[in-house]
Image (cartoon, coloured by chain):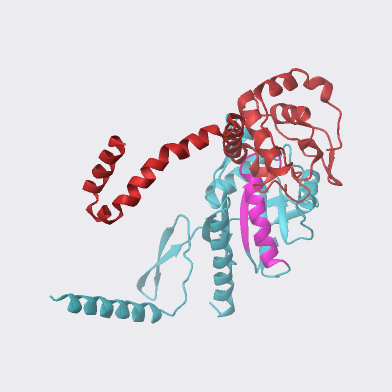
Chain colours: A red, B cyan
Amino acid sequence: MANNQLSVTGIISLFPELMHFRPVISKYIILLPMVLGAFSCTDAEELKKEQYFSEGYQLYTANCSNCHQPDGRGMANLYPPLVSSVALKNKGLLSCIIKYGMKDTILVAGKQFSRPMPANPKLTELEIAEIMTFVSVKWAKDSVYTRIGFVTGSLADCQKRQGSTNL
Amino acid sequence: MSFTKKIFSIALFCIFCTVLISCNGGKKKLPILGERDWTTKTIDGKEVTDTIYNVIPAYKFVNQNGDTITEKVTEGKIYVSDFFFTSCPTICPVMKKQMVKVYQEFKGNPEVMIVSHTIDPDHDTPKVLNQFAKDLGVSGNQWQFLTGPKEKIYEIGQKSYMSTAKQDSTAEGGYIHSGAFILVDKEKHVRGMYDGTTEEGTKNLVADMKLLLEEYKNGK
């Protein structure tokens, strides 16, 4: 409490105009630890999901959106959409495509696409997990984040996943 | 000087400037870009200096239908040119998305064309370009996709269109090229360079194309 008072005085001495609001400010400063406490009560998982989502958004913008577009709707018959693609539901396959690219002719939402997608050897497993979190939370209504362990496991058996062309 | 006097003189200056600008014919005219040269001739005993502007030279390439295309294809038209390659994973898709907007804006206008040069002719054969155009939703001849000998493409890109286009194994996709859209007038002078990777650059291009068409309408 004494500390709060001290900092309020400190702030007010810096900005004398704030003098009028003195009681209001001290009230908020008392509230602050309570608000912070409430936040730490939110699920750590939820926080991690948000972290992955925002990192994933950055990575998607840098690595994917040129072709798949910022809105995930792809571009004409050149690049397939992610929104409404079955691939978003098949996360094992999705991690393989992100890492190793793809050469098959595929069918997405009734349209045929045959342009190869380049591999992304530079992306780490964490980054792939973040991108997958972003796309699947954003466009497949996924409610949990994609774990690194899942990506590691999926990448280990990408060979087996080849051959699915209806995405 | 008192405060009101100051304000008054600033206002007066602003009005003066406005009048000055509006007296200037009202219309902005696009510059002619590129390297210039001069010649001096003697006409009627007087020495006259003429500016020689950068002009897109004669060329011969093959388009997405396998037809041979020369500079004659854009005769009497203004056109926008760019450099790309179909397997490009970086800026090309963004540029093409923007160029489609230009295409839609001037679709069917007999005075406007688009000329896209591939910088990867080994891969981008007329057949590949044909499929690319189709997949992009482009039909007809208003948008030409040209391929040809690599050194000719790089030469016209670097020298005439002032646009970087070359092979570079360290670059993603194997080539580096600028993301510029280049506006060329009916006299084959470059009249503007725009950032084809941004919405804003493309808007500026479309606005300048309208200005340029206006120039011809008003009789140059």
Quadrant showing the C terminus of chain A: top right
Q: Residue at x 59, y 64 (%)?
A: B206
**Position of A138 relative to B54 (above/below):** above
**Position of B158 relative to B107 (above/below):** above
The magenta region covers: B79-107
Q: Nearer the viewer, residue B210 or A76?
A: A76
**B96 drawn magenta:** yes
Q: Nearer the viewer, residue B117 or B210?
A: B210
Give the image location of residue B68, x and y in percent: 76, 53
- Number of callouts: 0
Residue projecting furthest to the left: B1
Give the image location of residue A84, x and y in percent: 79, 45
Q: Residue at x 45, y 54 (%)?
A: B35
Query: Which quadrant holds residue B167?
Result: top right
Q: Nearer the viewer, residue B155 or B136?
A: B136
Residue projecting furthest to the front: A1
**B72 drawn magenta:** no
Give the image location of residue A72, x and y in percent: 70, 46
**Position of B39 relative to A15 (above/below):** below
Q: Is residue A118 left or right of residue B183?
A: right
Q: Is residue B216 left or right of residue A144?
A: left
